[in-house]
Image (cartoon, rainbow, N blue to C red):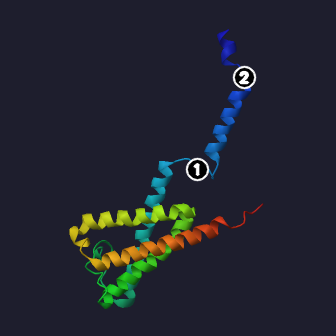
Amino acid sequence: MAILRKNRVASPQQAQNSTKRFASTNSKSSNKFNPRLIFSQIVALQSIHYLILSFMFQINSFIYGTTITVDRIFTAKHLDLWTKEGRIDAATIIISTVFGSLLLAIIVEKSKKCLDFSVTLFFVHFLICTFYEGKSVLRSLDFWIVHVLGMIIMVLLGEYFCSRKELMDIPLL
């Protein structure tokens, strides 16, 4: 009798439930909360953003002869909008947010999530800057102007690029 119960065929209701469960886990359009996916998207977005920013500061060093330091990314002392060097660094940050909006379209792929991921990117950046430099970041108006403007540009362009990607035709073959 115990052997018959082990080999028993599943009822139609059980088969239907297992089919629904399988279909919902494999569907790309599933809206289930997946913290691993969200965390990996945040880490990918943050690290590629820093790679792009570092590469752009390397290009600035080659073109304009500025020094290459980590301070350019994580401090506000080089970000003075009243100097030529500060305007170059501000333009670099703004241009990197345009590339960041393209990253949103590639990594996140949903226009309604662009605001969340952009704010998260800049909030984590602000925390890293605060731990790296201290409270002097809080007093730099130039830092806030450049980064808030960059965040706004990243959100708007990211939503635009993501919506364009969402509206693309799905190929049949």
Q: Which residue is drawn at 58% across and 50% down?
A: 31
For residue 156, side relative to residue 165 (left or right): left
> Quadrant of the rendered structure where residue 25 is?
top right
Q: What residue type is labelled 2?
A: Val
Q: Point out residue 86 in the picture as x, y percentages from the top left corner.
A: 31, 85
Determine which residue is flagged by label 2.
9
Residue 31 numbered mark, or none: 1
**Real-space Cα separation, disc 1 to disc 2, in angstroms:** 32 Å
Q: Is residue 61 visible?
A: no
Asked whether the beta carbons under mark 1 and mark 2 sit within 8 Å of each other, the answer is: no
Residue closer to the observer: 160 or 92: 160
Residue 24's place in the image compared with 140, above or below, is: above
Mark 1 residue crowding within 10 angstroms, few (<14) / some (14–19) / many (20+) = few
Q: Quadrant of residue 131?
A: bottom left
State the image quarter where residue 63 is shown. bottom left
| Residue 156 spot, x, y in % from top left | 51, 73
Quadrant holding the N terminus: top right
Q: Callout 1: helix, strand or loop?
A: loop
- Element type where label 2 sits in the image: loop
State the residue lying farthest toward the top.
1
Under mark 1, the amino acid is Asn
Residue 6 shows up from this direction: yes
Residue 21 at x, y = what percent?
63, 38
26, 13: nearer the viewer:
13
- Tell which residue pokes out farthest to the right in this image: 173
Position of 61 with respect to 165 (left or right) is left
Choose the circle earlier in sequence order: 1 or 2: 2
Is residue 101 rendered to the left or right of residue 138? Answer: right
Task: Name the spot of residue 117 as percent of width and height, x first.
Answer: 46, 62
Image height check: is 115 above or below 87? above
